[in-house]
């Protein structure tokens, strides 16, 4: 969380691929889980006191993480700074202290594990295994020799930028809906971060898939093999399942979210799920 995030890019760069996947997919959510499990039910008065400050820090994280990722040429650092932006959505939803925000934050946590874990392994692991570099320029144009890789990579990048129909969209939509009930100005301020997310993901896709007029020679590169394809297939299923039919996941957490909201804010009424009226 901004500004306590500076260890993350260094940890990603120094860690092996398996360590980075574990860090991105599981360990980053331990902090937000701590907010949900301990801070909100045990210290509700402190939560209400500090909620505006945490929400504004979350907005800063969304913007800062997006633009910092846009400036990176190291693929691991790019994914690390994108994680700062994504976790900003999680904390924004948690401290909105309403059902929509909390359900969205929980989905953001789940989706971040799916999408960022796949990006770290797909982009960093597979590219580093083949090229022995994480530099964006050195990997330019590999998509022309690895079409299946390009398809998977493009899909995960669309999920990362919260393209409608993918898993990240519904989580961020609920977070923004919950935050909108708290402050319209605050949600308006997140727009540059959302635009930056589209910019750095599409830039990465363009660079890796097509590159420029003077790409390095990647003639000998091999596309994804069957084992690698099968490894990513379940993540693709979850990207479309959560993106197109999120209601089963929301239904599972809804009773717990309502109970948590009432613990953190006893005056909050028991509201139905936000998406029930949309017939998802």
Image (cartoon, rainbow, N blue to C red):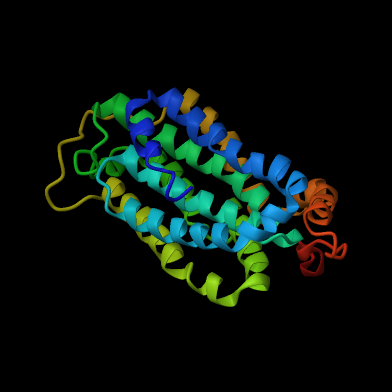
- Residue in the picture at 67% in, 65% down: 178
> Is residue 199 depicted above or below 188 in this figure?
above
The location of residue 158, given as percent across then percent down, is 47, 54
On the image, which quarter does residue 12 sit in?
top left
Residue 23 versus residue 264: which sits nearer the camera?
264
How many numbered discs, if any?
A: 0
Left or right: 151 in relation to 248: left
Compare residues 200 and 215 and report the one nearer the observer: 200
Q: Is residue 274 left or right of residue 170?
A: right
Judged left or right of residue 190, residue 273 is: right
For residue 223, say whether it is visible.
Answer: no
Up the image or down, 118 lies above or below 17; here it is: below
Tell me residue 226's x, y (percent): 48, 25
Kindly identify the residue that appears in the image at 43 percent across and 32 percent down: 121
Q: Locate residue 117, reporting x and y percent.
A: 50, 36
Horizontal side of 39 relative to 263 (left or right) equals left
In the image, residue 2 lies at what x, y percent? Answer: 44, 50
Residue at left 45%, top 23%? 18
Is residue 120 something one can see in this rendering? yes
Task: Pick the quarter of the image with the C terminus.
Answer: bottom right
Displayed quadrant of residue 217: top left
Q: Quadrant of residue 180?
A: bottom right
């Amino acid at each position: 969380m901004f500004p306590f995030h500076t260890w993350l890019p260094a940890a990603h760069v120094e860690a092996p691929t398996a360590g980075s996947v574990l860090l991105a997919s599981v360990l980053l959510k331990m902090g937000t889980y701590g907010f949900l499990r301990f801070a909100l039910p045990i210290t509700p008065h402190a939560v209400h006191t500090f909620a505006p400050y945490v929400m504004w820090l979350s907005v800063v994280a969304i913007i800062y993480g997006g633009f910092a990722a846009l400036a990176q040429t190291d693929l691991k650092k790019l994914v690390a700074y994108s994680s700062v932006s994504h976790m900003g959505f999680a904390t924004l939803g948690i401290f909105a202290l309403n059902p929509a925000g909390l359900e969205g934050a929980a989905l953001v946590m789940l989706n971040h594990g799916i999408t960022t874990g796949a990006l770290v392994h797909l982009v960093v692991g597979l590219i580093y295994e083949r090229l022995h570099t994480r530099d964006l320029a050195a990997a330019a144009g590999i998509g022309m020799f690895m079409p299946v890789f390009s398809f998977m990579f493009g899909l995960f990048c669309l999920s990362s930028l919260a393209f409608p129909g993918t898993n990240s969209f519904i989580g961020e939509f609920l977070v923004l809906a919950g935050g909108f009930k708290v402050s319209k100005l605050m949600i308006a301020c997140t727009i540059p971060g959302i635009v930056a997310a589209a910019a750095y993901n599409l830039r990465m896709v363009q660079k890796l898939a097509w590159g420029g007029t003077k790409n390095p020679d990647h003639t000998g590169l091999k596309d994804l093999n069957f084992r690698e394809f099968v490894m990513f297939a379940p993540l693709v299923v979850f990207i479309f399942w959560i993106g197109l039919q999120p209601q089963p996941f929301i239904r599972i957490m809804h009773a717990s979210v309502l109970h948590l909201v009432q613990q953190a804010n006893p005056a909050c009424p028991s509201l139905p799920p936000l998406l029930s009226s949309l017939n998802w």
